[in-house]
Image (cartoon, helix red, strand yellow):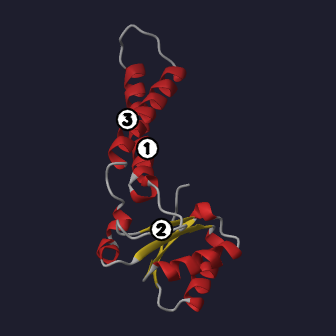
């Protein structure tokens, strides 16, 4: 999945785009709208805290760093002559524990930080524009961009992320 970003001038156009996307078989759970507080979204699918924060990138980084640290700690525990006989199972268990702790700690920080990608659009959001984020399979990115831009030339396409989390 890839996430496509569009800056939409108002909620009327956003409603029209969302309706077109639903007709083109984009599920509502894959459409997210970020707006300035106080702007009534009506039935537009508002972005959740997971979409507005760095939760998923932090999780990915925490799992990787925690797993690597756990692997090194497990290998060190096996290599050091402590009198305990440790094998591959212990290294595996310590690696998993490190990944779990790293993932937990990093997501606690990541959920409290605004998304780095959304921060790029903060000035436009403060002016009253809406940020429309659409998660689509890689092979539909150009199709969706074309559909939106063809029917709504006033919308700005801001590109797509290389990968997206659920």
Q: Residues within 10 Å of mark 1 (few under 14, many from 20)?
A: some
Labels 2, 1: front one: 2
Instruction: Tell whether label 1 touches label 2 (CB within 8 Å).
Output: no
For the N terminus, which image quadrant?
bottom right
State if disc 1 and disc 3 touch (CB < 8 Å): no
Please provide percent x and percent y for residue 160: 49, 73
Label located before the other in sequence (2 or 1): 2
Within 10 Å of disc 2 (Cα), the crowding (few <14, some 14-19, many 20+) is many
Please state the horizontal and vertical placement of residue 97, each as a whole percent of the image: 45, 28
Which residue was labeled with disc 2?
33
Q: How far from the left and from the top, in percent, is residue 9?
A: 42, 83
Q: Quadrant where the C terminus lies?
A: bottom right
**Residue on which disc 3 sits:** 69
Real-space CA distance between mark 2 and mark 1, rounded to the nearest whole angstrom: 30 Å
The answer to the question of whether label 3 and label 2 lie on touching residues, with beta carbons closer than 8 A, is no
Q: Residue at x 37, y 48 (%)?
A: 111
Relative to 96, say whether 18 is above or below: below
Q: Residue at x 44, y 37 (%)?
A: 67
Q: Which numbered dot is residue 64?
A: 1
**What element does badge 3 sit on?**
helix
Q: Which mark is residue 56?
A: none
Does residue 62 lie above or below 126 as drawn?
above
Disc 3/disc 1 C-alpha distance (Å): 9 Å
Q: Is residue 70 above or below residue 32?
A: above
């Amino acid at each position: 999945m890839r996430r496509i970003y569009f800056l939409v001038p108002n909620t009327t156009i956003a409603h029209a785009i969302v309706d077109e996307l639903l007709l083109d078989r984009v599920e509502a759970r894959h459409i997210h709208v970020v707006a300035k507080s106080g702007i009534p979204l009506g039935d537009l699918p508002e972005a959740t805290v997971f979409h507005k924060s760095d939760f998923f990138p932090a999780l990915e980084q925490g799992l990787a760093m925690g797993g690597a640290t756990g692997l090194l700690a497990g290998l060190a525990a096996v290599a050091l002559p402590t009198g305990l006989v440790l094998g591959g199972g212990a290294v595996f268990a310590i690696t998993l524990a490190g990944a779990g702790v790293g993932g937990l700690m990093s997501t606690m920080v990541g959920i409290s930080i605004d998304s780095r990608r959304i921060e790029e659009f903060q000035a436009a959001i403060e002016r009253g524009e809406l940020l429309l984020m659409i998660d689509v399979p890689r092979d539909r990115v150009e199709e969706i961009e074309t559909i939106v831009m063809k029917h709504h030339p006033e919308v700005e396409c801001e590109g797509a992320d290389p990968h997206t989390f659920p």
